Amino acid sequence: MPLTFEILLDEPPSALRILLVEPGAPAEVEHVSVLLKAPAPADATIFVGPEGGWTEPEWSAARRAASG
């Protein structure tokens, strides 16, 4: 059974989580180039959004999960 986005955000996090967003998205984001200066993580989760992009509630949920 596939996991929902919300359930996946509640799972124990990997060392690095990346939420890919389209360049014009109004979300507060950091450019992926910041990863060039970071050490390689032990593991990572990359979230690739649905066609049409992530919704505001989805970015908010991801940001809360990252800060909590």
Image: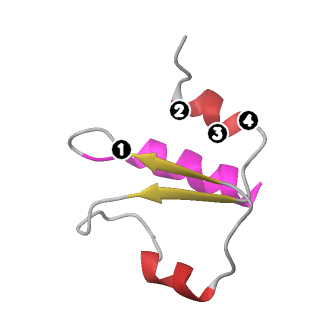
Q: Amino acid at mark 4?
A: Glu
Write the start and end of the magenta stretch as one range.
53-68
Q: Position of residue 26 (x, y in %)?
A: 32, 65
The residue pinned by badge 4 equals 11
Q: Amino acid at mark 3?
A: Leu
- Which residue corresponds to the image point at 65% horizontal and 52% vertical from the top-left? 64
The answer to the question of whether label 3 and label 1 lie on touching residues, with beta carbons closer than 8 A, is no
Q: Position of residue 18 (x, y in %)?
A: 53, 59
The residue pinned by badge 2 equals 5
The residue pinned by badge 3 equals 9
Label 2 CA crowd tier, 10 Å (few <14, some 14–19, many 20+): few
The answer to the question of whether label 3 and label 4 lie on touching residues, with beta carbons closer than 8 A, is yes
Q: Is residue 41 magenta?
A: no
Q: Is residue 60 magenta?
A: yes
Q: Amino acid at mark 1?
A: Gly
Cα distance, mark 4 to mark 1? 18 Å
